Image (cartoon, grey):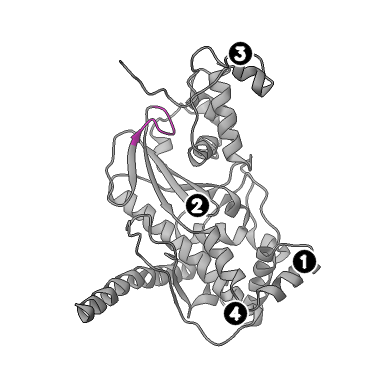
Amino acid sequence: MRRSVAFPGHPLGSGLTPDAAKELGLRAGTPVGTSLIDAHAGGGGVMESVVVPDPEAQEYDKEAICHRLVLVCGTSTCHMAVSCSKLFIPGVWGPFWSAMVPEYWLTEGGQSATGALLDYIIENHVASPRLANHAASQNISIFELLNKILESMVQDLNSPFLAALTEDIHVLPDFHGNRSPIADPKAKGVVCGLTLDTSEKQLAFLYLAKVQGIAYGTRHIVEHCNAHGHRIDTILACGGLSKNPLFLQEHADISCSIVLPRESESVLLGAAILGAVASKKYSSLSDAMKALNAASQAPLVLVLWLCLGIFFLSGMVIHPAKDLKVKKYHDAKYRIFRELYEQQLSHHSIMAQALA
């Protein structure tokens, strides 16, 4: 029996059968398209959300999409990039043919705990109940309050920039193993620089250090993929964590510019795009993505947003800080980040020899 794999959004059969249509309250024959998992649908909903000054003056560049990485960031994070040729990358899943965008090879990295890690750190800190009460009294989230605390601490401590508040705290965020690019399920999380301080301000320090550790993990994945044939220079972010300005700015400063889609629910948009292709509103998934993905050209004034302690609207571009001291700082912390895992391997070896 000959079998084939349909492209995402490809119309299947004759649409809904009468029985299925009755159960769903829809018409028989309603188009049914080949589906995608949630993260891949999010990729379809954001991959073409780039700022183009004059779309009519430019021909479509098939290679342009290969310079982008989709960051679907929530409880965990998926890092997805496509290429015209198949790239086998150690520690990264794939390549998968037409798994997200038809006629492109998909490479998929990931971090097993990102939003879950931030929740864990906050909820298990002794200052968490006090922080939650203060946030509730101001009718804002704990993350918004932490962002406001950090911004005030820049002034109080005369810090040269916000990221520098964690100069003495370093984090390896592998609390649930390392999915990419090391692919070590036994890797452990590391926090270097703890004290007996139990204040809300110290919790804010730890929160910032965890955000930075997650961002260094993304940088590691991007560098690893680029070293094996990719040419990623832009990140497109969606998911719950993409609503946090601190998370986004740290990622931009540590990796590269980040584009936010105008439509904040990119996974739902990706699913709608699949339906639009299945119903033949568009002739291909690529055409539907180009028509329905969008990004604004509006500039982002991060300091204002942080001072107000509120989260981003969608459709913006977050650029790395222009201050070269910020880059120098993150390069130094990234070097320590990489060393933390190497030290962990060394410690494992020492203990294995002791128990041999």
Mark 1 nearby-residue class (10 Å; few <14, some 14–19, many ≥20): few
Label of residue 202 in the image: 4
Span of residues in magenta:
96-102
Write down the residue under mark 2.
257
- Give percent across and percent down for residue 249: 56, 59
- On the image, numbered disc 1 is attached to which residue? 136
As measured in the structure, the alpha-carbon distance from the residue carrying label 3 to the one carrying label 2 is 49 Å
Give the image quarter of residue 264.
top right
Residue flagged by tag 2: what amino acid is it? Ser
State the image quarter where residue 330 is shown.
bottom left
Q: Secondary structure at mark 4?
A: helix
Mark 4 or mark 3, whichever is nearer to me: 3
Q: Quadrant of the N terminus?
A: top left
Query: The residue tagged with tag 1: helix, strand or loop?
Result: helix
Q: Of the two numbered discs 1 and 4 on the same chain, state the one appearing first in sequence.
A: 1
Q: Are marks 1 and 2 in contact (CB under 8 Å)?
A: no
At horizontal 58% and vertical 52% (from top left) the residue drawn is 242
